Image (cartoon, rainbow, N blue to C red):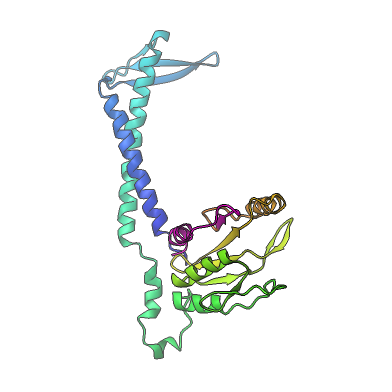
Amino acid sequence: MQNFKEDLEAQLKELDSLIKKSNANLSKLKHIPVRKIAISKSNGNDQYYWVDKDSGKRVYAKSGELDKLKETAQQGYEKALSKKLSYLRRCLYDFLKKYDVSEIDNVYDEMSKARQKLITPIVDTEEILVKKWKTVSYESLGFMDDSNFCSNNGVRVRSKSELIIANMLEQYGVPYHYEYPILLKRLGTVHPDFTCLNVRKKKEIIWEHFGMMDNIAYANKNVSKIHAYNQNGFLLGKNMIMTFETSQQAISSNIIRNMIEEFLI
């Protein structure tokens, strides 16, 4: 089960930002008298009226009072918005204090090993998920040359840059498949360099490394491939990572490390 806590925490920060902005807007409008506006239609045109809060009497708003109408309407909007934002923030904050999706795994994990043998958990625990994920069998592209780039865990890859990526994935304990086949509509089967598993989020992310972007034919071919990924729902930063290099600009370990820490752990 995917953990949405980070997304919810980001939503909470966004609400805080909106509340701050709305309060600032209200502060700018504090000099505006608190009044009500009534609206009606006349011959298809909007008619605005000032409404006395005590008697309810309506007075037609003149065309020269449009700026005052806007300020008063904005004031009412900001007050209603501030109230709603504060309510939503309070609800989300209270929910986050209790929200911990890992408790689902804990029900199984806290049982004895003997009892676990008798049970099939409703959701795979991290340990079971990783074990199943790693044991999936598939056919990669194979190797037609004598390239001898092997990761620390013995995974053979095609280039020095891919070797750096593979070793760093292994260093961080990120499970991955090398050149795992994916079927894309309008393009057919492709083999992204790495299909990675974010264990904490229980989410797959593909990683394509484009290593010859100063080669026009290579670049054109892979731009089309990137478009196909996008059309099939693989979006950069969501479920896809892309890195690039040229003959003059090699990829750095810092970039690889940043990608892993941001998206895969």
Q: Residue at x 71, y 57 (%)?
A: 185
Pick the residue in front: 53 or 249.
249
> Can you give x and y, in whole percent of width and height, for residue 198 in the image?
48, 66
The image shows residue 246 at horizontal and vertical percentages of: 60, 53
Q: Which residue is at the front of the view, 24 or 234?
A: 234
The answer to which quarter of the image holds residue 64 is top left
Residue at 30% over, 20% down: 35
Q: Measured from the top left, where is residue 154 in percent x and y?
A: 55, 79
> Where does the magenta region start and end?
241-265
Query: Foreground residue, 140 or 38?
Result: 140
* Magenta stretch: includes residue 19: no
- In the image, is residue 198 above or below residue 96? below
Picture layout, residue 251 above or below residue 140: above
Say whether residue 255 is magenta. yes
Q: Choose between 66 and 253: the one closer to the eye.
A: 253
x, y percentage for residue 171? 45, 71
**Image mark count:** 0
Q: Can you say which quadrant of the picture contains the C terminus?
A: bottom left
Q: Is residue 27 above or below residue 167?
A: above
Q: Residue furthest bottom?
A: 114
Residue at 33% x, 57% y is 96
Q: Residue at x 52, y 55 (%)?
A: 238
Is 59 rendered above or below residue 125?
above
The residue most toward the front is: 248
